[in-house]
């Protein structure tokens, strides 16, 4: 089959991609359709795979009709935020995703700023899809478990011919998109990942795609499982256990593929007893810090190392590209902690402070989509007053405790420039309290070679009025302009 099929039937144009996860094919088709001036309501996007009949019957009635864009058609606008969201959202299993993305792209042509409108139902839906896909990616990174199926005598060069196989059931079309992650991580192993939608096979040099598989095609157990179980029991910290949160992060459906999960009921049962013993022994330390964003995300949800984590709230992980291939600009922006809306949405800086930040970033010419945005403290600290949850500043001890996770994010993302907004963020980066008014306007060197720039927190601006607000907003703009200029220099 060609990359894409396209027919006109009646007044509607049927478009079908060859693959459910081929963003580039969708993008190319959408570009031609926009330039051919075909409005969203005239297109029926058909889910790849299950609709051969539709095309067969349509074939009789319709005719081949590829729109041809006029030679002078203007280029199609799609800003970085749209492309980033669309890349992920397209991997969602929702059959409406192609139409939704096209509608948004179509609207973007007339209203370029539409991506900033977080209340827009299309934007919200695309964000939801993208988030679900990111979650599925995280689950795959965290829960794929390889099992040894073959351990031969070795090849001519004397290399052992071990082959590891994992079974995984993704919720969305994420298998191909994650090939690079597993290839980099297990570059020296020969492995296969089998799923009901297709399989990946890495021989140490070349990646092959294979057909869908069944659970029975993957082996059930091997001696490595003892190692997994020992490792998991060693890093399991009962003091951080919240069963509801753990089940949310590690749903039972993944347990069957994870040897260490066999230990979970037993570990939960013994958790309280062990926690008390650990408190007595003063041993409430983290054994090892996870080394991927996905694993940090999972771990912060279970983190109970300070009292904020024990409130009824959610951990909010940083978000944004993590390397140049994902469009990372080298900038990490650090705030204080998620607020009420961030806690509910599970994303940093989406509430009033985030909206103000977005406006100032845009004014400075800084693309938020190219930055990794996170917080010094990962949980929302609040006091309940009636129905409201009132923000509380995190204490120095809480910031210092949560620094562990921020350092983990920095180690993965490796920013060239870190912008700390507000005193809590500055403390998290420097390990000591500094005065914003003294520290702003010039870079400080961080131990990993990156530069730290400090400015005020946007919530501070929100609390001011009149002249004070104008003055502080101008200082904030000046800081952001300096950051933009420096980032451009650093990345030149
Ligand atoms: N304030 C912050 O510091 N971080 C957020 O994510 C939102 C508000």
Image: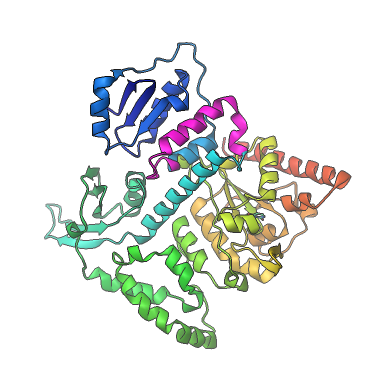
Q: Is the magenta stretch mostly helix, strand or loop?
A: helix
Quadrant where the image shows the C terminus:
top right
Q: Position of residue 224 (x, y in %)?
A: 25, 69
- Judged left or right of residue 485, residue 65 is left
Identify which residue, 397 or 239, lies in the foreground: 239
Q: In which quarter of the image is the N terminus?
A: top left
Task: Tell me if 394 is positioned left or right of 259 in this view.
Answer: right
- Quadrant observed for ligand 1 in the rendered image: bottom right
Image quadrant assignment for residue 486: top right
**How has the structure been colored for display?**
rainbow
Instruction: State the residue in front, 279 or 20.
Output: 20
Magenta stretch holds residue 13: no
> Magenta residues, as a range?
89-116
Q: Which residue is drawn at 66% across and 38% down?
A: 484
Q: Quadrant of residue 65?
A: top left
- Closest to the observer: 371 or 72? 72
């Amino acid at each position: 089959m060609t990359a894409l099929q396209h027919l006109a039937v009646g007044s509607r144009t049927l478009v079908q991609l060859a693959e459910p996860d081929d963003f580039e094919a969708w993008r190319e088709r959408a570009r031609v359709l926009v330039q051919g001036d075909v409005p969203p309501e005239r297109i029926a996007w058909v889910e790849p795979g299950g609709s051969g009949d539709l095309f067969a019957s349509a074939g009789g009635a319709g005719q081949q009709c590829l729109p041809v864009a006029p030679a002078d058609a203007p280029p199609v606008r799609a800003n970085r935020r749209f492309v980033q969201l669309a890349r992920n959202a397209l991997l969602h299993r929702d059959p409406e995703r192609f139409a939704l993305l096209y509608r948004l792209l179509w609207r973007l042509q007339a209203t370029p700023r539409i991506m900033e409108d977080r209340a827009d139902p299309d934007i919200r839906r695309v964000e939801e899809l993208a988030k679900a896909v990111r979650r599925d990616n995280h689950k795959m990174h965290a829960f794929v478990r390889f099992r040894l199926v073959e351990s031969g005598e070795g090849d001519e060069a004397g290399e052992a011919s071990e082959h590891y196989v994992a079974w995984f059931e993704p919720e969305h079309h994420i298998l191909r998109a994650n090939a690079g992650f597993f290839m980099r991580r297990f570059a020296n192993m020969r492995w296969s990942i089998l799923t009901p939608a297709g399989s990946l096979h890495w021989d140490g040099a070349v990646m092959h795609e294979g057909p869908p598989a069944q659970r029975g095609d993957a082996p059930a157990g091997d001696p490595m499982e003892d190692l997994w179980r020992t490792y998991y029991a060693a890093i399991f910290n009962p003091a951080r256990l919240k069963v509801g949160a753990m089940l949310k992060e590690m749903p039972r459906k993944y347990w069957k593929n994870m040897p260490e999960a066999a230990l979970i009921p037993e570990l939960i049962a013994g958790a309280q007893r062990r926690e008390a013993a650990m408190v007595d022994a003063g041993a409430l330390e983290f054994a090892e810090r996870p080394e991927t964003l996905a694993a940090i995300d999972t771990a912060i949800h279970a983190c109970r190392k300070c009292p904020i984590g024990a409130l009824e709230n959610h951990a909010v992980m940083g978000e944004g590209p993590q390397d140049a291939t994902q469009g990372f600009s080298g900038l990490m922006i650090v705030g204080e902690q998620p607020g009420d809306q961030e806690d509910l949405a599970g994303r940093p800086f989406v509430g009033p402070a985030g909206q103000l930040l977005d406006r100032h970033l845009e004014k400075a010419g800084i693309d938020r989509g190219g930055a990794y945005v996170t917080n010094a403290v990962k949980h929302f600290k609040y006091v309940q007053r009636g129905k409201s949850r009132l923000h509380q500043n995190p204490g120095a001890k809480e910031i210092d405790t949560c620094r562990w996770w921020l350092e983990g994010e920095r180690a993965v993302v490796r920013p060239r420039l870190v912008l700390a907004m507000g005193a809590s963020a500055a403390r998290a980066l420097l390990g000591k309290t500094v005065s914003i008014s003294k520290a702003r306007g010039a870079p400080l060197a961080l131990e990993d070679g990156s530069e730290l720039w400090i400015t005020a927190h946007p919530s501070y601006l929100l609390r001011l009025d009149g002249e004070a607000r104008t003055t502080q907003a101008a200082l904030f703009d000046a800081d952001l302009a300096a950051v933009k200029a420096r980032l451009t220099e650093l990345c030149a």
